[in-house]
Amino acid sequence: MNKKKINIFGVTGSIGKSTLQVLREEKIKDKYQPFVFSANENVDQLLKDCLEFKPRHAVIANESKYNILKKGLSGTDIQPSSGKKALLELASERVNWSMSAIIGFAGVEVALRCAEFSDVLALANKEALVCAGELLLSKINYHKNKLIPVDSEHSAIYQCLQGENRKGLKEIILTASGGPFRNWTMNDIKKATLKDALEHPNWDMGDKITIDSASMFNKSLELIEAMHLFNVSFHEIEVVIHPQSIIHSMVNFKDGTTIAQLAVPDMKGPIGYALNYPERDTIGLENINFTEVGQLEFFEPDYEKFHSLKIVEKVGRNLNLGVIFNAAKEVAVEKFISGEINFLDMALIVEKAINEKSLLDLTKSGKRTFLSLVEIDLAARDFSRNINF
Ligand code: NDP
């Protein structure tokens, strides 16, 4: 049997690690030949992963780590390389499947290459859709490749829509756990520490996305992600708080039927789905024991406490603002992590950025290319860094 050639961009991160766990599964491991593994800084972990899985290429984005990578791979057939150029060149080699899991805007260009050169783009990097949705989808369509979402909610919706006639779709229900601050007062959230924000009740994820979940910025990005993926308007998506994170999202149909996707909250689920598609196979997860779960709850989100859900509506009306929203959000999260601002200030930074005329003007000029997105991203970061409280 010919093994499928696969890439994992961002192999050392939370999604990368879960992808490797799926690949270690007995029924899966012999079906794939890893081609490229990439990381940014964490050369020790990259080496460990490479020595275990033996991809053809290992890329470390930070060039100063190249010698460590080269030394660690000497005597193996794995080719080391470093830097963004090498990363993009390797992402431009034809493969069967790519996991795009580099976090933030930094992952967008690689995702765009995968859209062109991978038969299947397993997309975790939601920022690629938020910032460059139109560009990404046009590449997927032009090159007749397939995009399978890995974000658990979007994987759920994708699964709910399999075999359905899209004319029957009424709306999408995007579930959210509510994060660690669901029952906190505004006053307490204002004083929340980094440690508080990193304590997600259900999901074990990378630090930045965990902070995004606590502020619901993650859900805001997901609303835009869903608009692009499923070609629906902002008002055709409802956010519902579901603290158990068992239902990963649902679709309402015109005939009054709702289809939901349920599974334990573990990213191996959506990753395994994207890897095995269109089949399903063992990926090391058990089915839900419903009598143990007992109860599933649903609540409306609190738009005052989670201001990001309100702000994002403006992006929902004009998707060109996605890149500003994301850049300002990334700067705001960095400022919160460094202790420069309090938790609620993050939303204020993003709100100011998406209302800033000079930034909005940039989104109106010319044809949308990746370079024009970089220009807007940089300007939005600059503007957001200079906001003082
Ligand atoms: P992590 O921060 O855990 O990992 C990010 C990965 O990207 C690491 O391998 C990191 O390398 C690499 N990386 C970071 N910056 C760069 C850069 N400038 N150039 C090249 N590589 C870089 O993130 P997550 O795994 O949590 O998230 C990855 C993506 O998946 C995000 O877009 C997130 O929104 C999305 N996602 C994540 C979920 C989760 O459960 N974690 C769920 C759904 C979506 P290094 O380790 O060397 O720093």
Image (cartoon, rainbow, N blue to C red):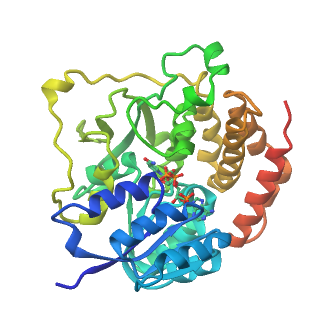
- Name the spot of residue 243 as percent of width and height, x first: 37, 26
The image quarter containing residue 85 is bottom right
Q: From this view, report whether residue 93 is shown above or below residue 309.
A: below
- Name the spot of residue 184 as percent of width and height, x first: 54, 16
Number of residue marks: 0
Left or right: 249 in relation to 40: left
| Quadrant in the picture for the N terminus | bottom left
Q: From this view, report whether residue 350 is shown above or below residue 145.
A: above
User: Which is more toward the observer, 267 or 337?
Assistant: 337
User: Which is more toward the observer, 119 or 366?
Assistant: 119
For the question of whether residue 365 can be seen, the reply is: yes
The image quarter containing residue 165 is bottom left
- Name the spot of residue 365 as percent of width and height, x first: 78, 65
The image quarter containing residue 84 is bottom right
Residue beneath the point at 24% across and 81% down:
3
Q: From this view, report whether residue 198 is shown above or below residue 291.
A: below
Residue beneath the point at 50% across and 57% down:
125
Left or right: 120 in relation to 125: left
For the question of whether residue 167 can be seen, the reply is: no
Q: From this view, report whether residue 337 is shown above or below residue 149.
A: above
User: Which is more toward the observer, 366 or 312?
Assistant: 312
- Name the spot of residue 205 as percent of width and height, x first: 45, 44
| Quadrant in the picture for the C terminus | top right
